[in-house]
Image: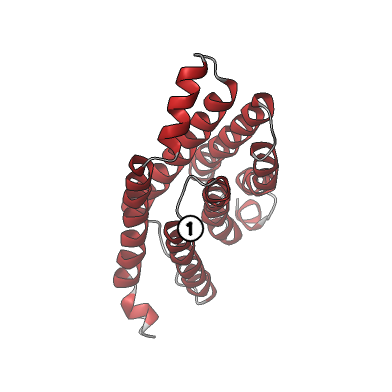
Amino acid sequence: MKAQQESFLTIPNQLTLLRILLVPVFVFLLLQDGAMMKLIGVVVFTVASLTDLYDGWHARRFNVVTRIGAFLDPLADKLLITAAFLVYVWMGYLELWMVLLVVVRDVVVTALRSWAEHRDHPVVTSRQAKYKTFLQNLFAYLVMVLIFLREAAPFGTASAEAIGRFLVSPVLDWIMLLVTAVTVSTGISYLIDNRAFIAGKRG
């Protein structure tokens, strides 16, 4: 079991690497014209998100948690969500400043987690951070589906136009503001919970 735990290419780590590799794929598909390409992009994003659920369960169930996996798994989540949010900014649906706050929070937390791992002080993901990840994924997925429905117009032109108006409405900004607030608050909580370690005190 020890040799398996130290192996880099465990099933959870392979799924994490797959999730990272799928990030540019779904970005490329989502930026293409045509409903079919966007639909495939939604499918790729969904598959990438589902690998996160399975690799975490597999790692815990079969006790194949590795140090590199503990680092790469949340990093893959952050790359997936950040890529989706930046695509929405490019399309004109989200405000850049809110996405930048999310990115800065994730960069800071990831850097501190890496430092903690290097100092043999692993940090367990809090329940609040897991809720944050779920909220981000849900929001990113719903916006992606709306983008596809607007392009495909399965319910008629009027519904497609209504979806288009919603995507540029203040309502979407308020939802993203909530996501941003939750994201930043979990980052602040992380800093507070680990302030002794950050200050250089191991005990």
Q: Look at the image and tell me in which quarter the C terminus lies.
A: bottom left
Q: Quadrant of residue 69?
A: bottom right
Query: Could you tell me how many numbered marks the image carries?
Result: 1
Where residue 143 sits in the image (x, y, percent)?
47, 36
Q: Name the residue at 51% across, 14% down.
A: 156
Q: Could you tell me if residue 94 is visible in this image? A: yes
Q: Is residue 188 above or below residue 155?
A: below
Q: Is residue 92 left or right of residue 14?
A: left
The amino acid pointed to by label 1 is Leu
Q: Name the residue at 42% across, 48% down.
A: 133
- What kind of colouring is applied to the model shown? secondary structure
Q: Residue furthest bottom?
A: 200
Residue located beneath label 1 in the image: 96
Q: Is residue 82 left or right of residue 196?
A: right
Where residue 12 sits in the image (x, y, percent)?
60, 45
Q: Is residue 145 above or below residue 192?
A: above
Where residue 84 sits in the image (x, y, percent)?
55, 46
Q: Nearer the viewer, residue 192 or 68?
A: 192
Secondary structure beneath label 1: helix
Where residue 67 sits in the image (x, y, percent)?
56, 61
Q: Name the residue at 64% across, 33% down.
A: 41
